[in-house]
Amino acid sequence: MPLLAFETSCDETSAAVIHHNRVLSNVVSSQVRLHAEYGGVVPELAAREHLRNLVPVARSALRQAGVSAESLEAVCATQGPGLPSALMVGLRAAQAMAFALSRPFVGIHHHEAHLYSPWIHGQPPVADFENFQPNVSLIVSGGHTMLVRVPADMKPRLLGSTLDDAAGECFDKVGKLMGLPYPAGPAIDRLAEGGDCAAFDFPRPLINSQDHDFSFSGLKTSVRYFLKDHPALMNERKQIQNLCASVQGAIVDVLVSKTIRAARSTGVRCVTASGGVACNRALRSKLATACQSGGLCLRLAEPGFCTDNAAMIGILAERRIEVCPAGSSLSGDILPNWPLGDYLIN
Ligand code: KG4
Ligand code: ZN
């Protein structure tokens, strides 16, 4: 029987219906326009918007899948990590629905679910992750930048994460300094296409460190000083393109080089990537080149599944139900700081 999944950990309200690793529907309502005027996600507004959108999004996911609520096997939702008030909406809705239907509820770890999104592909999308473990997975978005080792049993181990800003946050903050609308990642990606990534030299923080951590706040600060020193630069389109290409080049170099090093040092043959920044074309192509020359297989999430979505939550929930048909506790609470790999608290 199919299951219904909710994702409301940040600024995307999403519902999906999953059956036997197949995505029957995946509806995503993005709040990007709402938060654009504030230059970032405003948690209180995000929660209110989730409240407004969740029922229509869930209805449309069920309709598109051709499934009735009564025929669901379980209802699941992101339990953490994420914005507390935003998580609360999806979690409580899923628990209430599970209670009303007398079905199990399953609480899912958001980052762990990201590890499944590179395996969702095709039309209708199907997840085929079984044959490609172990791997090293780069999860890179506006809220997170992390490297995870995914062994054959799919019990992930966090290798490293950002010590300050996430890579997407760096794109967005640099864009703000340049006067680009939020979120600036896609605009920088487009502008960089016409620029020279060697035009300006920006730092590549922690690129040679032996750990698997990242740091992007210093890069943002160096762009701030660079713009202060070159006030006329923003008047010339070519220079704007060069700046975008140079900043993007610095971010991508760090992400690619640390991902490949993590794959090498943990002895895996496969690399995956997901999260909003994994839509970035330079990152996709540089990762592909680096993996090819290093003899590593690469699996990138399709752009539509890079950003937050309920399909990845449902795919993982289906596996959980196989192991524990009773699901999680209906009285379980949100876990805004849930560490990856910690199963004891669920
Ligand atoms: O996964 P996501 O939708 O939401 C979370 O942050 O959880 O990721 C959004 C982030 C934003 O920072 C946005 O600027 C960045 O992903 N992003 C990109 C691109 N598309 C989205 N960054 C660089 N290049 C892109 N093409
Ligand atoms: Zn995410």
Image (cartoon, helix red, strand yellow):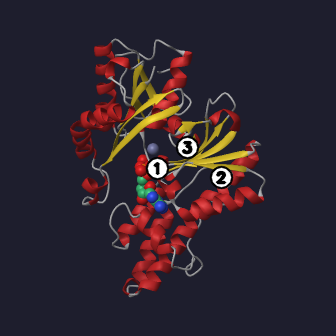
Q: In this view, does 144 lie to the left or right of 284?
A: left
The residue lying toward the viewer, choosing from 146 and 108, is 108
Q: In which quarter of the image is residue 281?
A: bottom right
Query: Residue at 47% of width from left, 79% of height from top?
Result: 241
Instruction: Give the mark count.
Output: 3
What whole-number distance in Å separates the C-alpha atoms at marks 1 and 3?
10 Å
The residue lying toward the viewer, choosing from 320 and 28, is 28
Q: Name the residue under label 2.
A: 259
Where is residue 42 drawn, in percent x and y? Answer: 27, 49
Q: Mark 1 points at which residue?
A: 304
Residue 343 appearing in the image = no
Q: Is residue 196 left or right of residue 289?
A: left
Look at the numbered discs 2 and 3 and tell me whether their residues touch, using CB distance below 8 Å.
no
The residue lying toward the viewer, choosing from 86 and 210, is 86
What whole-number distance in Å separates the C-alpha atoms at marks 2 and 3?
22 Å
Label 1 crowding class (10 Å Cα cut-off): few <14, some 14-19, many 20+? some
Residue 8's place in the image compared with 32, above or below, is: above
Q: Which of marks 1 and 3 is nearer the N terminus?
A: 3
Q: Earlier in the sequence, mark 1 or mark 2?
A: 2
Residue 267's place in the image compared with 94, above or below, is: below
Q: Quadrant of ligand 1?
A: bottom left
Where is residue 300 drawn, in percent x and y? Answer: 59, 50
Q: Quadrant of residue 197?
A: bottom right
Please, what is the three-letter code of the amino acid marked with disc 2?
Answer: Thr
**Regarding mark 3 in the picture, which secondary structure is present there?**
strand
Label 3 beta carbon less than 8 Å to ligand 1: no
